[in-house]
Image (cartoon, grey):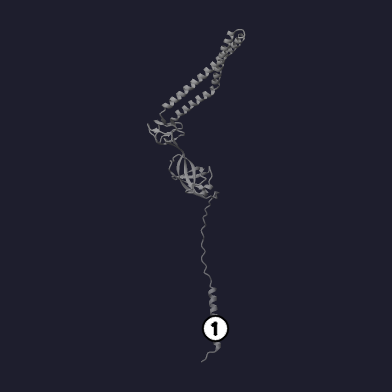
Amino acid sequence: MPVKPSSYKYSLILLLVVVSIAFFLIFTKPVKQLPLQRIPPLQVTVIPVQTAEMAPRISVTGYLRPARKAKLHFELAGQLQGRYVKAGKQVGKGDLLLQLEDGDYADAVAEARAGLQEEQAAIERDRLLLSYLQDNRKLQQQEVARMQRLGKKSLASQSKYGETRQRLLQLQADEEKLKYSVVTAAARLQLRQVTLRRAQRNLARTRLLAPFAGVVNVVAVQVGDYVSPSQVALELVSIDRLELYCEVDSQTAYALKLGQQVAVRINGVSQQGRIIAIQSDPDPATFTHQVRVSLAGEHLLPGQLGQADLPL
């Protein structure tokens, strides 16, 4: 039996109504309410705000070395007579370290001192002789004048006048010699004094003294050795203050200043140091700049490693 077209129409409308009711029921479904729970109070930690300088820093490693180090040598050649120190001994400024044979130099001082005394005595003698000679010359001038008056009356007087005048000329020549000796006395005396001072300095150079207080590091000569001026005889170091020697790049060196305070850590202990030297021209092989930081040498030894915090 054939189906009527109106039946399809009613069936489609019914289906649409059923679907619409289903969607409506789904979207209008009541939301399940969760039970409210009590929220515990929050704990807040208050930290005081402090001002601080936020500056970048770089840590560099270096090694300690003595602030003062001297390689001592004699200024004269000779045989070593005395050795009064050993490596590791603490010495003060001016202490006697080594000594050469000084017999020849002591004799040179005695000879120069005797020559000075002789010259001083000769100068006093010449001054006294000059005064005597000037008086004698005045008397001779008077005698020449008297013989000149008598020579007009007799031939004998004329002959004696010539002898008297010749004697006067001799006295005048001797007077000029003594005047020259007296005038140059100060110069000759100074030359003698220079000779004496030079001999005294040479005698002092036979003794090698400590130029500063420190510790003897190396003694390179023994008693009886012949020592030359170019030979290093002793090495002296001062460890009261040490220097941290490190190398930095150009950017770091540009940021540093002489006298700047930096923190240095050695064996886990931190202390303040002061920058005392910055190499301006870098090393041509490594293109790094040498920086030296001065530190107190207490409880530290040369050769130890340390880290310096350098501000950029």
Q: In the displayed structure, does residue 299 sit left or right of residue 44?
A: left
Looking at the rendered structure, the kind of residue marked 1 is Leu
Q: Above or below — where is 72 with respect to 289?
A: above
What x and y, as percent, mark residue 297?
Answer: 46, 39
Q: Above or below — where is 229 with respect to 4?
A: above
- Name the one closer to the observer, 262 or 129: 129
What x and y, as percent, mark residue 302?
Answer: 43, 41
Q: Measuring 50% from the left and 21% from the top, which residue is drawn there?
A: 119
Question: Can residue 83 be seen by looking at this rendering?
Answer: no
- Name the one closer to the observer, 212 or 235: 235
Please tell me how many numbered marks the rendered image carries.
1
What x and y, as percent, mark residue 272?
Answer: 49, 43
Q: In the displayed structure, does residue 30 sit left or right of residue 153?
A: left
Q: Residue 153 appears in which quarter of the rendering?
A: top right
Residue furthest to the front: 155
Q: Measuring 42% from the left and 26% from the top, which residue is drawn there?
A: 104
- Classed neighbour count for the residue bearing mark 1: other residues with Cα under 10 Å, few (<14), some (14–19), many (≥20): few
Name the residue that disc number 1 marks.
Answer: 12
- Name the one closer to the observer, 213 or 36: 213
- Name the one closer to the observer, 59 or 238: 238
What x and y, as percent, mark residue 190?
Answer: 52, 25
Label 1: element kind: helix
